[in-house]
Image (tube, helix red, strand yellow):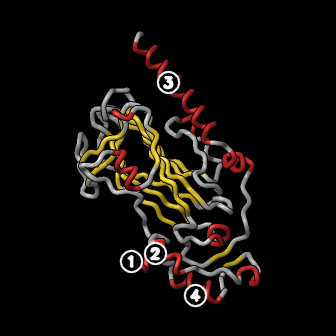
Amino acid sequence: MTLGKILPSQKWLDAANSNKFENSELAVEDSANFKFNLENLEASEKGYNIYSPFKIHQGMTFQEHAEKYNFRYDLWEEDFGIAIENNCTKCEPDDSVENCFAFSFREQEILIDIDLVDFGIEPWILDHVRPKIRVTQKANHHTDSGAILALAVQMGRCEKPPHRVYLHEDALDVAEDRTLGVCRREWEIGSAAKWEDMIVELSDYPSRMRHLTIIIAGKDKPYWRGFFGPKIANLQFQVILPEEPVLYKLREPLDCEERADEKTEEEELARRKIQLLADYSKKLCDSFT
């Protein structure tokens, strides 16, 4: 643990201690109680450091990883869900990648829930600074197969904010929703199987956000039984304060963001099952033509 990376910069600490923010939209008396709880930051061992939600190990099943690192997943078939592979299984190796998760022929999801306050991020920081949220991962695909992969970040006021399916183009209606960021990759059969970076950043979100969910969704394109889908590794998350201490007025959510926060997971699951059944029916029809 490197304490200096967990804590905000000295410039931010000084500004909070003295209540002197050079750039502030608030009256001085409104920010008098804006302090950093250093004990909470140290206890979290996360804070403003780069955080890896999980490490991928050989000799462990995917389900054992989920239990060890406390993340959720949605596998439509346990036997052909997500496998653990090394960095060069049917792809070009990369020194920065040791092991990876490899997706199969059905749409699979990995979901990592993060409580920002538990990380040591102060509510006043989330409301009046709205620091940049950055999520990155390495991505690749099986050289003999096409694949689709999406990395999404959904912020919310409540724990486990509801989310949508992000693999399809018609689901990427994110322009007006400042609580959502999506990065999508698609590979064709025979395309170069090199490890590349996927990055999602959020900085224009409304106030009162306390939670976020990282969603990784993937599948292969030819619908081949086996692990011919996309590969992911080195998932990282970080809260990044601006270089100069600044305070903004509260930013209220848009109507679409309010509605998104009120959706239930049951509604989304029902919609997703209907979509999967439609996709499967189309596959069957195509196989007979």
Q: Residue at x 47, y 77 (%)?
A: 42
Local secondary structure at mark 1: loop
Look at 56% across and 56% down and name the residue there: 212
Indicate the position of residue 113 as horizontal and vertical percent values: 51, 54
Q: Which residue is mark 4?
A: 14
**In the displayed structure, does residue 35 sit left or right of residue 148?**
right
Judging by the rendered image, the residue that carries numbered circle 3 is: 279
Mark 4 element type? helix
Amino acid, disc 2? Ile
The foreground one among 206 and 6 is 6
On the image, the x and y values in percent for residue 251 come to: 72, 63
Tell me if mark 4 has few (under 14), some (14-19) or many (20+) residues whose alpha carbon lies within 10 angstroms of its own: some
How far apart are the two marked residues, 3 and 1, measured between alpha carbons?
Answer: 48 Å
N-term mark: 3 or 1: 1
Q: CA distance from mark 3 to mark 2?
A: 45 Å
Is the Cβ of the residue at disc 3 closer than 8 Å to that at disc 2?
no
Quadrant of the rendered image containing residue 50: bottom left
Q: Is residue 70 visible?
A: yes
Residue tagged by mark 2?
A: 6
- Local crowd at mark 3 within 10 Å, few (<14), some, or many (≥20)? few
Report, in whole angstroms, how far the alpha carbon at label 1 lies from the one at label 2. Answer: 7 Å
* Quadrant (top left/top right/bottom left/bottom right) for the C terminus: top left
Dot 1 and dot 2 residues touching (CB under 8 Å):
yes
The residue singled out by tag 1 in the image is 2
Residue count near mark 1 (Cα–Cα under 10 Å), binned few <14, some 14–19, many ≥20: few
Q: Amino acid at mark 4?
A: Asp
Real-space Cα distance between discs 4 and 2? 16 Å
